[in-house]
Image (tube, rainbow, N blue to C red):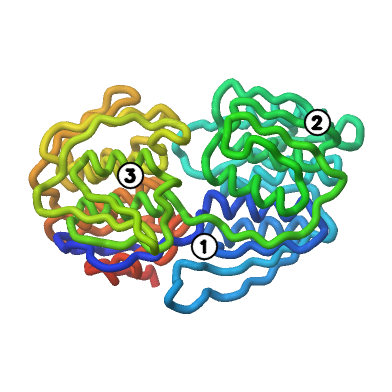
Amino acid sequence: MDRIKIVGGHKLEGVIPISGAKNAALPLMIASLLTGDRLTLKNVPNLADVNLLARILRNHGVDHSIEGKRASPTPHLGETFHLTARDIVDTTAPYEMVSRMRASFWVLGPILARMGQARVSLPGGCAIGTRPVDLHLTGLKALGAEIDIDGGYVVAKAAHGRLRGGRVVFPKVSVGATHNVLLAAALAKGETVIENAAREPEIGDVANCLVKMGAHIEGIGTSTLRIQGRDSLEGAVHTVLPDRIETGTFAFAVAATGGNVLLEGARAGLLETALAALEQTGAVVTQEADGIRVRRNGSGVDPITIETQPFPGFPTDLQAQLMALMATARGTSVIRETIFENRFMHVQELARLGADIQLHGDTATIRGVKHLKGAPVMATDLRASVSLVIAGLVADGETTVNRVYHLDRGFERLEEKLSRCGARIERISAG
């Protein structure tokens, strides 16, 4: 397996282009199942998860072609995908594919809505909690789906040959369930109302694309979505919004190492709570015409107390990165994880670098140390892996991050972006 080697102690200075959001690109690709026309998606990041989903969609009959990246001065604009699902040739999403990426489970709603039936394996993905699919299934049942679990597969049929609009009230916020029901409701007959819907910007990005495809959706960006289903949708052209998690990750890395970096193409409005937290630590964040600038002088990092929350709160996908930043803060920080029950697996690996972290249930207490020291560490999931990179950038000496295939799932050209800003980081290929 590939590894990443980092020699810490170097400030980040320069420009880091922000890629398109993985968490929007995946459901947007899945939306291609809703129409026989071509859906063109711009600014798609070149990631392992995106490439895997493309293979899964091909299995269902989606033809796709890719245009290359645009040249400078806008390198953050990624690839352009053309996706066409003239015919759904297979309504089954097999275990060997779905088990590798949880978001591929979201094909269930669109295939069911378009074909009246679907058979989708129960999902896999990062081992950061059970994340049951009950909310997905309950939501689809409210639209008239009859659902059984058979041999590890969800077998769904539309009771009347076609889904019908209904009222869906989620007992708790779920990004995945909101995506699945929203996509299905676009082709359901009549009106669907989703209450306590997730408000993440990626949900809004998908909803805006569906509107371009002919869907009628009210309440975009709020917790109540009202969808008037259509008999069919048409093709569209849509640009994936910039990745707020990548933005926050690099912002925390700049704050950890010091320096001054422009995050090109980033939008402050997509992560206001995270940037406000970053400013509490002593970093300076400013919105510029080309993106967001983050800088920190040599005064050190101030501690912070925060808990993860659904949007617009502090994102769980930035919790590990914040913890890496707090590892060298001047005092004690407290982070409470309220979204996933098993998202502290990076703690033991950060401790290998000298971090002083104590866990008590869903709460981590981080006592800042003056120095971290490089060591071999092991990535356990996507966001945890990049927290180890941030810690390695700060640590004295050499840090080796193993199992970096997790990084390739969600961060495009990570080593290149960091090295261009002065980091001493390189990938060591297994071969």
Residue 281: which quarter of the image? top left
Q: Residue furthest top?
A: 171
Q: In terms of sequence position, does the residue under pointer 2 or pointer 1 come before the other?
A: 1
Q: Which residue is mark 1?
A: 45
Picture coordinates of residue 208, whole percent (x, y): 65, 49
Picture coordinates of residue 78, whole percent (x, y): 52, 67
Q: Is residue 352 left or right of residue 123?
A: left
Q: Which amino acid type is marked by label 2? A: Gly
Closer mark to the observer between disc 3 and disc 2 = 3
Using the rendered image of the protein, determine whether residue 134 is visible from the camera's viewpoint: no
Picture coordinates of residue 34, whole percent (x, y): 77, 50
Q: In terms of sequence position, does the residue under pointer 3 or pointer 2 come before the other?
A: 2
Residues at marks 3 and 1, CA–CA distance in whole angstroms? 23 Å
Check disc 1 and report its element: helix, strand or loop: loop
Label at residue 275: 3
Q: Which amino acid type is marked by label 3? A: Leu
Q: Nearer the viewer, residue 277 or 419?
A: 277
Check disc 3 and report its element: helix, strand or loop: helix
Please give the name of the residue rendered at 35% of the width and 46% of the height, measured from the top-left corner.
384
Please give the name of the residue rendered at 22% of the width and 63% of the height, measured from the top-left corner.
12
Q: State whether residue 350 is above or below residue 295.
A: above
Q: Nearer the viewer, residue 320 or 264?
A: 264
- Crowding near the residue tagged with mark 2, few <14, some 14–19, many ≥20 C-alpha atoms within 10 Å: many
Residues at marks 3 and 2, CA–CA distance in whole angstroms? 39 Å
Q: Which residue is mark 2?
A: 165
